[in-house]
Image (cartoon, grey):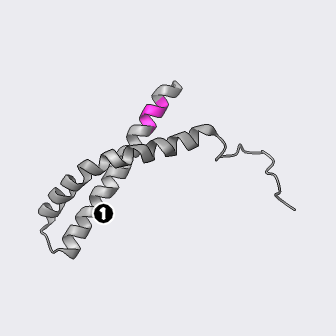
Amino acid sequence: MSAQVRRSLLRTGLIAFVVLDLLGLASFVFNQWFAVQFWHAWGLAALLALPLTMLVLPLVEAVLDAASQGRSVPLTGENIPGAGQ
């Protein structure tokens, strides 16, 4: 799998995960705090999650950029400076 295809799949999966989490959280808040019926809460949460998706895109890109730099995840067996002192 090429790096471009891998990044595209990671980006799509991460966006879907974050948006579904926002959707679930918003529907829970609407249902519990405002005593809205179950399906109305999901509908209101969907309306809220759609514009929030545009705000999530830069966050997802920042996470993938940090992971692709390789500085955040050391290789196994690599010596970590200052460890064991």
Q: Of all residues shown, which one is farthest toward the top?
A: 2
Foreground of the two, 66 or 10:
66
Q: Is residue 8 magenta?
A: yes
| Vertical arrangement, residue 62 with respect to residue 82, above or below | above
- Label 1, secondary structure: give it: helix
Could you tell me residue 27's position as x and y percent?
23, 63
Q: Is residue 75 magenta?
A: no
Q: Quadrant of residue 31?
A: bottom left
Could you tell me residue 75's position as x and y percent?
71, 43
Q: Is residue 77 left or right of residue 50?
A: right
Residue found 50% across the figure and 46% down from its top: 63
* Secondary structure, magenta segment, majority class: helix
Q: Amino acid under label 1?
A: Leu
Q: Is residue 65 left or right of residue 58?
A: right
Residue found 42% across the figure and 44% down from its top: 58
Residue receiving disc 1: 25
Q: Quadrant of residue 13?
A: top left
Residue found 21% across the figure and 58% down from its top: 45
Residue found 49% across the figure and 26% down from its top: 4
Foreground of the two, 62 or 22:
62
| Vertical arrangement, residue 47 with respect to residue 61, above or below | below
Q: Which residues are magenta?
A: 6-10
Q: Is residue 65 left or right of residue 34?
A: right
